[in-house]
Image: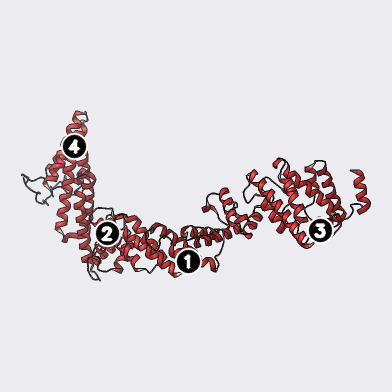
Amino acid sequence: MRPILQRFQDEFGTPDTDNAAVRYAVLRAALAARVGNWPEAVRRCPDSDLDLAATGVVHALAVSALRRLGEEGGRHADSCTAALAIVLWAHLLDEEDPGDFRSLLTSRRGTPVPDELWEEARHHLLGRITDLLHALDVRGGRDALAAWETAWETERAVLAVAPSDAGPDGLIPLGDAARHLVDHGRHLALLDAYTARHPDPATWTADSPDHRACANALAQALAERGQDRVRAKEWSEALADFGTAARLGRTPGAAERAAVLRAGNNVGRSRTGRDYSPITRIQGLELAHALLPEDGSLAAELTAELVRQGRKVFDSDPRQSRNRFARALVVSPRDRDARSGLDDHLREDLRRALDGAQPRENIHAEAVRDLLRRDPDCASARRWLRDRNAEWAVAAASGRHLAAARSAVRRVIQYDGGEGPYEEELVSSVLVDLLVDQAWFSGAESTRAGWERRVDLLSTAVGIAGPARDDVREEYEAAVLDLAEYLEATASPSDVIELFLRDLIRTGVSARFDQTVKAAYLRRAQTREEEGDLGGAQRDRACAQQIGAELPDQGLLFGPAPRIRRRHPHDFGQETLF
Protein backbone atom coordinates (compact mmCIF):
# COMPACT_ATOMS: atom_id res chain seq x y z
CA MET A 1 0.00 0.00 0.00
CA ARG A 2 2.90 2.42 0.63
CA PRO A 3 3.78 2.91 -3.07
CA ILE A 4 0.13 3.66 -3.81
CA LEU A 5 -0.08 6.16 -0.96
CA GLN A 6 3.18 7.80 -2.08
CA ARG A 7 1.91 8.10 -5.60
CA PHE A 8 -1.37 9.56 -4.32
CA GLN A 9 0.55 12.04 -2.18
CA ASP A 10 2.74 13.08 -5.11
CA GLU A 11 -0.36 13.79 -7.20
CA PHE A 12 -2.66 15.39 -4.63
CA GLY A 13 -0.28 16.58 -1.91
CA THR A 14 -0.18 15.88 1.83
CA PRO A 15 -3.42 15.65 3.82
CA ASP A 16 -2.96 19.06 5.44
CA THR A 17 -6.14 20.54 3.94
CA ASP A 18 -9.77 19.44 4.15
CA ASN A 19 -9.80 18.49 0.49
CA ALA A 20 -6.75 16.28 0.83
CA ALA A 21 -8.07 14.82 4.09
CA VAL A 22 -11.23 13.61 2.38
CA ARG A 23 -9.22 12.16 -0.52
CA TYR A 24 -6.90 10.28 1.82
CA ALA A 25 -9.82 9.01 3.96
CA VAL A 26 -11.63 7.56 0.96
CA LEU A 27 -8.40 6.07 -0.36
CA ARG A 28 -7.60 4.39 2.94
CA ALA A 29 -11.21 3.09 3.08
CA ALA A 30 -10.88 1.66 -0.42
CA LEU A 31 -7.53 0.02 0.38
CA ALA A 32 -8.98 -1.45 3.59
CA ALA A 33 -11.93 -2.85 1.64
CA ARG A 34 -9.59 -4.30 -0.97
CA VAL A 35 -7.85 -6.42 1.64
CA GLY A 36 -11.19 -7.38 3.31
CA ASN A 37 -10.94 -5.12 6.35
CA TRP A 38 -14.51 -3.84 6.10
CA PRO A 39 -14.80 -2.43 9.66
CA GLU A 40 -11.79 -0.24 8.90
CA ALA A 41 -13.25 0.72 5.53
CA VAL A 42 -16.51 1.79 7.17
CA ARG A 43 -14.67 3.72 9.86
CA ARG A 44 -12.43 5.54 7.38
CA CYS A 45 -15.01 6.53 4.78
CA PRO A 46 -16.60 9.96 5.35
CA ASP A 47 -20.36 10.40 4.83
CA SER A 48 -20.11 13.92 3.39
CA ASP A 49 -17.97 15.98 1.01
CA LEU A 50 -17.41 12.95 -1.19
CA ASP A 51 -17.18 15.29 -4.18
CA LEU A 52 -13.71 16.25 -2.85
CA ALA A 53 -12.49 12.67 -3.19
CA ALA A 54 -11.15 11.05 -6.31
CA THR A 55 -14.16 9.72 -8.25
CA GLY A 56 -12.30 6.60 -9.33
CA VAL A 57 -11.49 5.68 -5.75
CA VAL A 58 -15.10 6.33 -4.67
CA HIS A 59 -16.32 4.14 -7.53
CA ALA A 60 -13.91 1.34 -6.64
CA LEU A 61 -15.02 1.38 -3.01
CA ALA A 62 -18.70 1.50 -4.02
CA VAL A 63 -18.33 -1.48 -6.34
CA SER A 64 -16.54 -3.46 -3.63
CA ALA A 65 -19.28 -2.69 -1.08
CA LEU A 66 -22.05 -3.68 -3.48
CA ARG A 67 -20.29 -6.92 -4.42
CA ARG A 68 -19.86 -7.81 -0.76
CA LEU A 69 -23.59 -7.30 -0.15
CA GLY A 70 -24.40 -9.61 -3.03
CA GLU A 71 -21.88 -12.31 -2.16
CA GLU A 72 -23.40 -15.73 -1.48
CA GLY A 73 -26.94 -14.38 -1.33
CA GLY A 74 -26.15 -11.70 1.21
CA ARG A 75 -24.36 -13.95 3.70
CA HIS A 76 -21.88 -11.17 4.43
CA ALA A 77 -24.48 -8.41 4.40
CA ASP A 78 -24.25 -6.24 7.50
CA SER A 79 -25.72 -2.84 8.23
CA CYS A 80 -22.36 -1.01 8.09
CA THR A 81 -21.51 -2.38 4.65
CA ALA A 82 -25.02 -1.60 3.46
CA ALA A 83 -24.74 1.97 4.77
CA LEU A 84 -21.40 2.38 3.01
CA ALA A 85 -22.78 1.13 -0.30
CA ILE A 86 -25.85 3.33 0.02
CA VAL A 87 -23.86 6.50 0.74
CA LEU A 88 -21.36 5.94 -2.08
CA TRP A 89 -23.84 4.95 -4.80
CA ALA A 90 -26.24 7.73 -3.86
CA HIS A 91 -23.32 10.11 -4.40
CA LEU A 92 -22.24 8.59 -7.70
CA LEU A 93 -25.73 8.34 -9.19
CA ASP A 94 -27.03 11.71 -8.03
CA GLU A 95 -28.86 13.62 -10.78
CA GLU A 96 -26.51 16.58 -10.43
CA ASP A 97 -23.47 14.27 -10.62
CA PRO A 98 -21.42 16.08 -7.91
CA GLY A 99 -18.56 13.57 -8.21
CA ASP A 100 -18.38 13.92 -12.00
CA PHE A 101 -19.00 10.19 -12.40
CA ARG A 102 -20.08 10.69 -16.00
CA SER A 103 -16.68 12.21 -16.85
CA LEU A 104 -14.97 9.20 -15.32
CA LEU A 105 -16.97 6.89 -17.55
CA THR A 106 -16.21 9.10 -20.57
CA SER A 107 -12.47 8.93 -19.92
CA ARG A 108 -12.58 5.17 -19.54
CA ARG A 109 -14.69 4.73 -22.71
CA GLY A 110 -12.65 7.20 -24.66
CA THR A 111 -15.84 8.72 -26.05
CA PRO A 112 -18.56 10.92 -24.48
CA VAL A 113 -21.57 9.19 -22.99
CA PRO A 114 -24.78 10.33 -24.73
CA ASP A 115 -27.51 11.81 -22.52
CA GLU A 116 -30.01 9.09 -23.36
CA LEU A 117 -27.52 6.34 -22.62
CA TRP A 118 -26.40 8.03 -19.40
CA GLU A 119 -29.95 8.38 -18.05
CA GLU A 120 -30.87 4.86 -19.07
CA ALA A 121 -27.75 3.40 -17.46
CA ARG A 122 -28.22 5.49 -14.34
CA HIS A 123 -31.83 4.42 -13.85
CA HIS A 124 -30.98 0.81 -14.60
CA LEU A 125 -28.25 0.81 -11.96
CA LEU A 126 -30.51 2.54 -9.45
CA GLY A 127 -33.09 -0.19 -10.02
CA ARG A 128 -30.56 -2.97 -9.62
CA ILE A 129 -29.36 -1.56 -6.31
CA THR A 130 -32.95 -1.12 -5.14
CA ASP A 131 -33.80 -4.71 -6.05
CA LEU A 132 -30.74 -6.03 -4.23
CA LEU A 133 -31.50 -4.08 -1.06
CA HIS A 134 -35.14 -5.15 -1.19
CA ALA A 135 -34.13 -8.79 -1.49
CA LEU A 136 -31.78 -8.42 1.46
CA ASP A 137 -34.58 -6.78 3.47
CA VAL A 138 -36.92 -9.65 2.76
CA ARG A 139 -34.25 -12.16 3.70
CA GLY A 140 -33.44 -10.23 6.88
CA GLY A 141 -37.09 -9.77 7.89
CA ARG A 142 -36.83 -5.99 8.12
CA ASP A 143 -40.04 -3.92 8.01
CA ALA A 144 -40.48 -0.75 5.97
CA LEU A 145 -39.15 1.46 8.78
CA ALA A 146 -35.88 -0.47 9.19
CA ALA A 147 -35.53 -1.51 5.55
CA TRP A 148 -32.26 -0.78 3.73
CA GLU A 149 -34.38 0.02 0.71
CA THR A 150 -36.05 2.84 2.69
CA ALA A 151 -32.65 4.11 3.82
CA TRP A 152 -31.43 4.00 0.20
CA GLU A 153 -34.38 6.00 -1.07
CA THR A 154 -34.08 8.48 1.81
CA GLU A 155 -30.34 8.93 1.25
CA ARG A 156 -30.92 9.76 -2.38
CA ALA A 157 -33.40 12.45 -1.28
CA VAL A 158 -31.91 14.01 1.87
CA LEU A 159 -28.50 12.35 2.57
CA ALA A 160 -29.60 10.80 5.86
CA VAL A 161 -27.32 7.75 6.12
CA ALA A 162 -24.07 7.70 8.11
CA PRO A 163 -22.08 4.44 7.70
CA SER A 164 -20.47 4.63 11.13
CA ASP A 165 -23.89 5.15 12.85
CA ALA A 166 -25.61 2.16 11.28
CA GLY A 167 -27.27 0.03 13.92
CA PRO A 168 -29.40 -3.10 14.15
CA ASP A 169 -32.71 -1.16 14.13
CA GLY A 170 -32.09 0.74 10.89
CA LEU A 171 -29.63 2.82 8.92
CA ILE A 172 -31.50 6.09 9.44
CA PRO A 173 -33.47 7.63 12.33
CA LEU A 174 -37.00 6.27 12.71
CA GLY A 175 -38.58 9.68 12.17
CA ASP A 176 -36.70 10.16 8.88
CA ALA A 177 -37.79 6.75 7.65
CA ALA A 178 -41.42 7.44 8.57
CA ARG A 179 -41.38 10.83 6.88
CA HIS A 180 -39.86 9.40 3.71
CA LEU A 181 -42.49 6.67 3.49
CA VAL A 182 -45.31 9.18 3.80
CA ASP A 183 -43.81 11.67 1.38
CA HIS A 184 -43.39 8.97 -1.26
CA GLY A 185 -46.94 7.58 -1.05
CA ARG A 186 -46.09 4.57 1.09
CA HIS A 187 -48.34 5.48 4.03
CA LEU A 188 -49.85 1.98 4.14
CA ALA A 189 -46.38 0.40 4.45
CA LEU A 190 -45.60 2.81 7.28
CA LEU A 191 -48.82 2.02 9.14
CA ASP A 192 -48.37 -1.74 8.71
CA ALA A 193 -44.80 -1.58 10.05
CA TYR A 194 -45.70 0.72 12.92
CA THR A 195 -48.76 -1.29 13.92
CA ALA A 196 -46.63 -4.43 14.02
CA ARG A 197 -44.32 -2.64 16.45
CA HIS A 198 -47.12 -0.99 18.48
CA PRO A 199 -50.31 -3.06 18.08
CA ASP A 200 -52.63 -0.77 20.08
CA PRO A 201 -53.37 2.48 18.21
CA ALA A 202 -55.22 3.77 21.28
CA THR A 203 -51.81 4.41 22.87
CA TRP A 204 -50.54 6.49 19.96
CA THR A 205 -50.32 10.03 21.33
CA ALA A 206 -48.14 12.95 20.40
CA ASP A 207 -46.81 13.46 23.93
CA SER A 208 -45.76 9.83 24.40
CA PRO A 209 -41.96 9.29 24.30
CA ASP A 210 -42.53 6.08 22.35
CA HIS A 211 -44.37 7.85 19.52
CA ARG A 212 -43.09 11.41 19.53
CA ALA A 213 -40.46 10.84 16.80
CA CYS A 214 -42.98 9.55 14.26
CA ALA A 215 -46.07 11.46 15.42
CA ASN A 216 -46.33 13.89 12.51
CA ALA A 217 -45.65 11.31 9.83
CA LEU A 218 -48.02 8.83 11.45
CA ALA A 219 -50.77 11.43 11.68
CA GLN A 220 -50.43 12.24 8.00
CA ALA A 221 -50.41 8.57 7.07
CA LEU A 222 -53.54 7.95 9.12
CA ALA A 223 -55.28 10.93 7.55
CA GLU A 224 -54.47 9.66 4.08
CA ARG A 225 -55.65 6.15 4.91
CA GLY A 226 -58.77 7.64 6.44
CA GLN A 227 -59.60 9.38 3.19
CA ASP A 228 -58.92 6.16 1.29
CA ARG A 229 -61.36 4.36 3.57
CA VAL A 230 -64.02 7.03 3.11
CA ARG A 231 -63.75 6.53 -0.63
CA ALA A 232 -64.13 2.78 0.01
CA LYS A 233 -67.17 3.50 2.31
CA GLU A 234 -65.43 2.00 5.33
CA TRP A 235 -66.94 4.63 7.61
CA SER A 236 -66.06 3.34 11.07
CA GLU A 237 -62.49 2.49 10.15
CA ALA A 238 -62.04 5.89 8.52
CA LEU A 239 -63.28 7.74 11.60
CA ALA A 240 -60.99 5.65 13.79
CA ASP A 241 -58.02 6.71 11.64
CA PHE A 242 -58.98 10.37 11.78
CA GLY A 243 -59.40 10.12 15.56
CA THR A 244 -55.96 8.57 16.03
CA ALA A 245 -54.45 11.24 13.77
CA ALA A 246 -56.03 13.90 16.00
CA ARG A 247 -54.50 12.30 19.10
CA LEU A 248 -51.13 12.51 17.36
CA GLY A 249 -51.61 16.27 17.03
CA ARG A 250 -53.00 16.63 13.52
CA THR A 251 -55.54 19.36 12.77
CA PRO A 252 -57.78 18.22 9.90
CA GLY A 253 -57.70 20.25 6.72
CA ALA A 254 -60.63 21.02 4.45
CA ALA A 255 -60.49 17.69 2.60
CA GLU A 256 -60.22 15.72 5.82
CA ARG A 257 -63.09 17.67 7.41
CA ALA A 258 -65.27 16.86 4.43
CA ALA A 259 -64.30 13.19 4.71
CA VAL A 260 -65.10 13.17 8.45
CA LEU A 261 -68.48 14.76 7.83
CA ARG A 262 -69.31 12.24 5.12
CA ALA A 263 -68.25 9.31 7.29
CA GLY A 264 -70.22 10.65 10.25
CA ASN A 265 -73.39 10.98 8.20
CA ASN A 266 -73.13 7.40 6.91
CA VAL A 267 -71.54 5.41 9.71
CA GLY A 268 -73.58 2.50 11.03
CA ARG A 269 -76.20 2.48 8.31
CA SER A 270 -76.69 1.69 4.65
CA ARG A 271 -79.06 2.90 2.00
CA THR A 272 -81.24 -0.19 2.35
CA GLY A 273 -81.23 -0.07 6.16
CA ARG A 274 -80.25 -3.73 6.44
CA ASP A 275 -76.86 -3.10 8.01
CA TYR A 276 -78.09 -0.54 10.55
CA SER A 277 -76.14 -0.82 13.80
CA PRO A 278 -77.09 1.68 16.53
CA ILE A 279 -74.00 1.03 18.62
CA THR A 280 -71.68 1.44 15.64
CA ARG A 281 -73.54 4.57 14.60
CA ILE A 282 -73.33 6.16 18.04
CA GLN A 283 -69.64 5.35 18.38
CA GLY A 284 -68.92 6.70 14.91
CA LEU A 285 -70.91 9.88 15.51
CA GLU A 286 -69.08 10.38 18.79
CA LEU A 287 -65.76 10.23 16.93
CA ALA A 288 -66.98 12.57 14.21
CA HIS A 289 -68.39 15.02 16.76
CA ALA A 290 -65.11 15.01 18.70
CA LEU A 291 -63.23 15.81 15.48
CA LEU A 292 -65.69 18.52 14.38
CA PRO A 293 -67.29 19.81 17.61
CA GLU A 294 -68.45 23.01 15.93
CA ASP A 295 -70.47 21.18 13.28
CA GLY A 296 -74.12 21.47 14.27
CA SER A 297 -75.37 18.76 11.93
CA LEU A 298 -73.20 16.08 13.53
CA ALA A 299 -74.23 17.18 17.02
CA ALA A 300 -77.91 17.08 16.05
CA GLU A 301 -77.57 13.65 14.44
CA LEU A 302 -75.70 12.25 17.46
CA THR A 303 -78.29 13.67 19.85
CA ALA A 304 -81.19 12.23 17.86
CA GLU A 305 -79.56 8.78 17.73
CA LEU A 306 -78.85 8.82 21.47
CA VAL A 307 -82.45 9.80 22.26
CA ARG A 308 -83.79 7.18 19.86
CA GLN A 309 -81.77 4.40 21.49
CA GLY A 310 -82.55 5.71 24.97
CA ARG A 311 -86.26 5.37 24.24
CA LYS A 312 -85.76 1.96 22.69
CA VAL A 313 -84.22 0.42 25.84
CA PHE A 314 -86.18 2.53 28.34
CA ASP A 315 -87.79 -0.48 30.02
CA SER A 316 -85.35 -3.26 29.13
CA ASP A 317 -82.15 -1.50 30.20
CA PRO A 318 -82.93 1.61 32.29
CA ARG A 319 -79.31 2.26 33.16
CA GLN A 320 -78.17 2.36 29.53
CA SER A 321 -81.24 4.39 28.60
CA ARG A 322 -80.47 6.97 31.27
CA ASN A 323 -76.86 7.17 30.10
CA ARG A 324 -78.01 7.73 26.52
CA PHE A 325 -80.26 10.63 27.53
CA ALA A 326 -77.58 12.14 29.77
CA ARG A 327 -75.00 12.01 26.99
CA ALA A 328 -77.49 13.57 24.57
CA LEU A 329 -77.92 16.49 26.97
CA VAL A 330 -74.16 16.96 27.12
CA VAL A 331 -74.00 17.13 23.33
CA SER A 332 -77.10 19.33 23.03
CA PRO A 333 -77.92 20.92 26.42
CA ARG A 334 -81.24 22.36 25.22
CA ASP A 335 -82.61 19.24 23.58
CA ARG A 336 -86.16 18.75 24.87
CA ASP A 337 -86.44 15.08 23.97
CA ALA A 338 -83.29 14.20 25.92
CA ARG A 339 -84.49 16.19 28.94
CA SER A 340 -87.92 14.58 28.69
CA GLY A 341 -86.31 11.13 28.67
CA LEU A 342 -84.36 11.81 31.84
CA ASP A 343 -87.44 13.32 33.50
CA ASP A 344 -89.44 10.20 32.67
CA HIS A 345 -86.74 8.07 34.30
CA LEU A 346 -86.82 10.26 37.38
CA ARG A 347 -90.62 10.01 37.58
CA GLU A 348 -90.32 6.23 37.42
CA ASP A 349 -87.68 6.27 40.16
CA LEU A 350 -89.92 8.46 42.31
CA ARG A 351 -92.84 6.11 41.83
CA ARG A 352 -90.75 3.11 42.81
CA ALA A 353 -89.28 4.91 45.80
CA LEU A 354 -92.69 6.01 47.05
CA ASP A 355 -93.94 2.44 46.65
CA GLY A 356 -90.96 1.12 48.60
CA ALA A 357 -89.52 -0.76 45.63
CA GLN A 358 -86.16 1.07 45.77
CA PRO A 359 -84.27 3.13 48.37
CA ARG A 360 -85.12 6.81 48.44
CA GLU A 361 -81.47 7.63 49.04
CA ASN A 362 -80.69 6.77 45.42
CA ILE A 363 -82.56 9.89 44.29
CA HIS A 364 -80.97 13.34 44.49
CA ALA A 365 -83.13 16.07 45.99
CA GLU A 366 -81.78 18.74 43.65
CA ALA A 367 -82.80 16.67 40.61
CA VAL A 368 -86.33 16.33 42.02
CA ARG A 369 -86.55 20.07 42.67
CA ASP A 370 -85.42 20.74 39.10
CA LEU A 371 -88.10 18.38 37.84
CA LEU A 372 -90.74 20.16 39.91
CA ARG A 373 -89.66 23.51 38.48
CA ARG A 374 -90.12 22.13 34.97
CA ASP A 375 -93.34 20.31 35.86
CA PRO A 376 -95.14 22.00 38.80
CA ASP A 377 -97.99 19.45 38.58
CA CYS A 378 -95.75 16.42 39.17
CA ALA A 379 -97.43 14.84 42.20
CA SER A 380 -94.74 12.23 42.78
CA ALA A 381 -92.03 14.91 42.97
CA ARG A 382 -94.09 16.93 45.47
CA ARG A 383 -94.78 13.89 47.59
CA TRP A 384 -91.14 12.76 47.56
CA LEU A 385 -89.88 16.21 48.52
CA ARG A 386 -92.57 16.45 51.19
CA ASP A 387 -91.53 13.12 52.70
CA ARG A 388 -87.84 13.99 52.43
CA ASN A 389 -88.31 17.26 54.29
CA ALA A 390 -90.45 15.49 56.85
CA GLU A 391 -87.55 13.13 57.53
CA TRP A 392 -85.18 16.09 57.83
CA ALA A 393 -87.58 17.82 60.23
CA VAL A 394 -87.83 14.76 62.49
CA ALA A 395 -84.08 14.23 62.45
CA ALA A 396 -83.37 17.88 63.27
CA ALA A 397 -85.95 17.96 66.06
CA SER A 398 -84.54 14.76 67.54
CA GLY A 399 -81.11 16.41 67.61
CA ARG A 400 -82.61 19.48 69.34
CA HIS A 401 -82.03 21.64 66.24
CA LEU A 402 -85.47 23.19 66.33
CA ALA A 403 -84.77 26.07 63.95
CA ALA A 404 -83.70 23.64 61.20
CA ALA A 405 -86.66 21.40 62.00
CA ARG A 406 -89.13 24.28 61.68
CA SER A 407 -87.55 25.34 58.39
CA ALA A 408 -88.02 21.81 57.04
CA VAL A 409 -91.62 21.79 58.26
CA ARG A 410 -92.35 24.96 56.32
CA ARG A 411 -91.19 23.17 53.18
CA VAL A 412 -93.41 20.22 54.10
CA ILE A 413 -96.40 22.55 54.27
CA GLN A 414 -95.35 24.16 50.98
CA TYR A 415 -95.14 20.82 49.15
CA ASP A 416 -98.51 19.87 50.67
CA GLY A 417 -99.95 22.83 48.83
CA GLY A 418 -99.96 25.39 51.61
CA GLU A 419 -99.25 29.04 50.91
CA GLY A 420 -97.03 31.12 53.14
CA PRO A 421 -96.35 32.86 55.37
CA TYR A 422 -96.92 30.08 57.90
CA GLU A 423 -97.84 30.80 61.52
CA GLU A 424 -95.57 29.38 64.18
CA GLU A 425 -98.50 27.60 65.80
CA LEU A 426 -99.20 25.75 62.54
CA VAL A 427 -95.53 24.90 62.09
CA SER A 428 -95.30 23.54 65.64
CA SER A 429 -98.48 21.52 65.24
CA VAL A 430 -97.25 19.94 61.98
CA LEU A 431 -93.85 19.17 63.53
CA VAL A 432 -95.53 17.48 66.48
CA ASP A 433 -97.68 15.40 64.12
CA LEU A 434 -94.58 14.35 62.17
CA LEU A 435 -92.84 13.28 65.38
CA VAL A 436 -95.92 11.32 66.51
CA ASP A 437 -96.23 9.59 63.12
CA GLN A 438 -92.55 8.65 63.12
CA ALA A 439 -92.88 7.38 66.69
CA TRP A 440 -95.67 5.07 65.59
CA PHE A 441 -93.45 3.62 62.83
CA SER A 442 -90.56 3.19 65.26
CA GLY A 443 -92.76 1.32 67.74
CA ALA A 444 -93.91 -1.00 64.99
CA GLU A 445 -90.41 -2.50 64.87
CA SER A 446 -91.08 -4.37 68.17
CA THR A 447 -87.44 -4.11 69.22
CA ARG A 448 -85.86 -2.40 72.17
CA ALA A 449 -84.24 0.18 69.89
CA GLY A 450 -87.62 0.80 68.25
CA TRP A 451 -89.38 1.31 71.59
CA GLU A 452 -86.56 3.57 72.80
CA ARG A 453 -86.76 5.60 69.59
CA ARG A 454 -90.51 5.94 70.03
CA VAL A 455 -90.12 7.28 73.56
CA ASP A 456 -87.45 9.78 72.47
CA LEU A 457 -89.57 11.09 69.58
CA LEU A 458 -92.67 11.49 71.73
CA SER A 459 -90.63 13.19 74.44
CA THR A 460 -89.50 15.74 71.86
CA ALA A 461 -93.08 16.14 70.66
CA VAL A 462 -94.30 16.78 74.22
CA GLY A 463 -91.71 19.49 74.67
CA ILE A 464 -92.78 21.24 71.45
CA ALA A 465 -96.55 20.77 71.90
CA GLY A 466 -96.76 22.10 75.46
CA PRO A 467 -99.79 21.62 77.72
CA ALA A 468 -102.28 22.25 74.92
CA ARG A 469 -101.79 18.79 73.39
CA ASP A 470 -102.92 16.31 76.03
CA ASP A 471 -103.18 13.62 73.35
CA VAL A 472 -99.43 13.83 72.73
CA ARG A 473 -98.63 13.47 76.44
CA GLU A 474 -100.95 10.48 76.68
CA GLU A 475 -99.15 8.92 73.68
CA TYR A 476 -95.83 9.58 75.39
CA GLU A 477 -96.91 8.03 78.71
CA ALA A 478 -98.30 5.00 76.88
CA ALA A 479 -94.97 4.64 75.01
CA VAL A 480 -92.99 4.68 78.27
CA LEU A 481 -95.34 2.04 79.73
CA ASP A 482 -94.97 -0.10 76.60
CA LEU A 483 -91.19 0.15 76.86
CA ALA A 484 -91.26 -0.82 80.51
CA GLU A 485 -93.44 -3.85 79.83
CA TYR A 486 -91.22 -4.82 76.90
CA LEU A 487 -88.16 -4.67 79.15
CA GLU A 488 -90.00 -6.63 81.84
CA ALA A 489 -90.63 -9.41 79.32
CA THR A 490 -87.29 -9.44 77.52
CA ALA A 491 -84.64 -7.84 79.76
CA SER A 492 -83.48 -7.93 83.36
CA PRO A 493 -85.22 -6.20 86.29
CA SER A 494 -82.32 -3.73 86.43
CA ASP A 495 -83.23 -2.48 82.93
CA VAL A 496 -86.77 -1.69 84.07
CA ILE A 497 -85.43 0.05 87.19
CA GLU A 498 -82.98 2.12 85.10
CA LEU A 499 -85.89 3.22 82.90
CA PHE A 500 -87.81 4.24 86.04
CA LEU A 501 -84.85 6.19 87.40
CA ARG A 502 -84.70 8.25 84.17
CA ASP A 503 -87.81 9.99 85.55
CA LEU A 504 -89.75 9.77 82.30
CA ILE A 505 -93.00 9.32 84.25
CA ARG A 506 -93.54 10.33 87.81
CA THR A 507 -94.92 7.76 90.22
CA GLY A 508 -98.65 7.91 90.61
CA VAL A 509 -99.34 8.82 87.01
CA SER A 510 -99.74 5.26 85.69
CA ALA A 511 -100.65 2.46 88.03
CA ARG A 512 -99.50 -0.14 85.52
CA PHE A 513 -96.10 1.53 85.20
CA ASP A 514 -95.73 1.76 88.98
CA GLN A 515 -96.74 -1.86 89.36
CA THR A 516 -94.19 -2.91 86.69
CA VAL A 517 -91.39 -1.01 88.44
CA LYS A 518 -92.39 -2.39 91.86
CA ALA A 519 -92.36 -5.93 90.50
CA ALA A 520 -88.88 -5.32 89.04
CA TYR A 521 -87.55 -4.19 92.42
CA LEU A 522 -89.01 -7.23 94.12
CA ARG A 523 -87.58 -9.64 91.53
CA ARG A 524 -84.16 -8.08 91.83
CA ALA A 525 -84.39 -8.23 95.64
CA GLN A 526 -85.13 -11.94 95.42
CA THR A 527 -82.18 -12.46 93.08
CA ARG A 528 -79.88 -10.56 95.41
CA GLU A 529 -81.02 -12.64 98.38
CA GLU A 530 -80.20 -15.80 96.46
CA GLU A 531 -76.75 -14.38 95.66
CA GLY A 532 -76.17 -13.45 99.34
CA ASP A 533 -76.48 -9.67 98.87
CA LEU A 534 -78.83 -9.10 101.76
CA GLY A 535 -78.19 -5.35 101.97
CA GLY A 536 -79.01 -4.85 98.32
CA ALA A 537 -82.13 -6.99 98.64
CA GLN A 538 -83.30 -4.93 101.62
CA ARG A 539 -82.82 -1.68 99.72
CA ASP A 540 -84.75 -3.00 96.72
CA ARG A 541 -87.68 -4.05 98.95
CA ALA A 542 -87.69 -0.65 100.58
CA CYS A 543 -87.88 1.01 97.16
CA ALA A 544 -90.69 -1.32 96.13
CA GLN A 545 -92.59 -0.47 99.31
CA GLN A 546 -92.17 3.26 98.70
CA ILE A 547 -93.48 2.87 95.15
CA GLY A 548 -96.33 0.74 96.39
CA ALA A 549 -97.35 3.45 98.80
CA GLU A 550 -98.23 5.60 95.84
CA LEU A 551 -100.51 3.00 94.22
CA PRO A 552 -104.31 3.23 94.58
CA ASP A 553 -106.09 0.61 96.63
CA GLN A 554 -107.25 -1.16 93.50
CA GLY A 555 -105.62 -0.81 90.13
CA LEU A 556 -107.71 -0.74 87.00
CA LEU A 557 -108.04 -4.00 85.25
CA PHE A 558 -108.42 -2.42 81.85
CA GLY A 559 -106.57 0.53 80.37
CA PRO A 560 -104.23 3.05 82.01
CA ALA A 561 -104.71 4.09 85.61
CA PRO A 562 -106.02 7.57 86.37
CA ARG A 563 -103.49 10.23 87.11
CA ILE A 564 -102.86 10.63 90.85
CA ARG A 565 -101.45 13.95 91.89
CA ARG A 566 -101.41 13.40 95.71
CA ARG A 567 -98.13 13.07 97.53
CA HIS A 568 -97.21 11.44 100.81
CA PRO A 569 -96.40 13.96 103.52
CA HIS A 570 -92.94 12.46 103.70
CA ASP A 571 -92.58 12.07 99.83
CA PHE A 572 -91.00 8.66 99.35
CA GLY A 573 -91.26 8.98 95.53
CA GLN A 574 -88.53 9.00 92.86
CA GLU A 575 -86.60 11.83 94.51
CA THR A 576 -85.94 9.62 97.49
CA LEU A 577 -85.04 6.69 95.24
CA PHE A 578 -82.52 8.81 93.35
Mark closest to the chain's N terminus, 3 or 2: 3
- Label 1, secondary structure: give it: helix
Circle 2 residues within 10 Å: few <14, some 14–19, many ≥20: few
Query: Disc 4 residue type?
Result: Asp
The residue most toward the right is: 10
In the image: residue 77, left or right of residue 372: right
Q: Residue at image x 39%, y 67%?
A: 333
Q: Can you identify the residue that label 1 sits on?
A: 261
Residue receiving disc 3: 102
For marks 2 and 4, give the CA distance.
Answer: 60 Å
Pair 2/4: label in front:
2
The quadrant in which the N terminus is found is top right
What residue type is disc 2 on? Glu
Return the x and y of residue 181 as percentages of the image width and height: 63, 56
- Mark 3 vs mark 2, CA separation in Å: 88 Å
* Badge 4 vs badge 1, beta-carbon distance below 8 Å: no
Q: Is residue 216 above or below residue 566?
A: below
Residue identified by numbered label 4: 540
Which residue is located at x 21 percent, y 32 percent? Answer: 535
Q: Nearer the viewer, mark 3 or mark 2?
A: 3
Does residue 299 appear left or right of residue 224 in this picture?
A: left
Q: Earlier in the sequence, mark 3 or mark 4?
A: 3
Give the CA separation, mark 3 to mark 4: 131 Å
Residues marked 2 and 4 touching at CB (< 8 Å):
no
Element at label 2: helix
Mark 3 in CB contact with mark 4 (< 8 angstroms): no
Pointer 2: what residue?
A: 348
Q: CA distance from mark 4 to mark 1?
A: 92 Å
Query: Could you tell me the amino acid type at mark 1?
Result: Leu
Residue 335 versus residue 142 in the image, above or below: below
Precedes in sequence: disc 2 or disc 1: 1
Quadrant location of the C terminus in the rendered image: top left
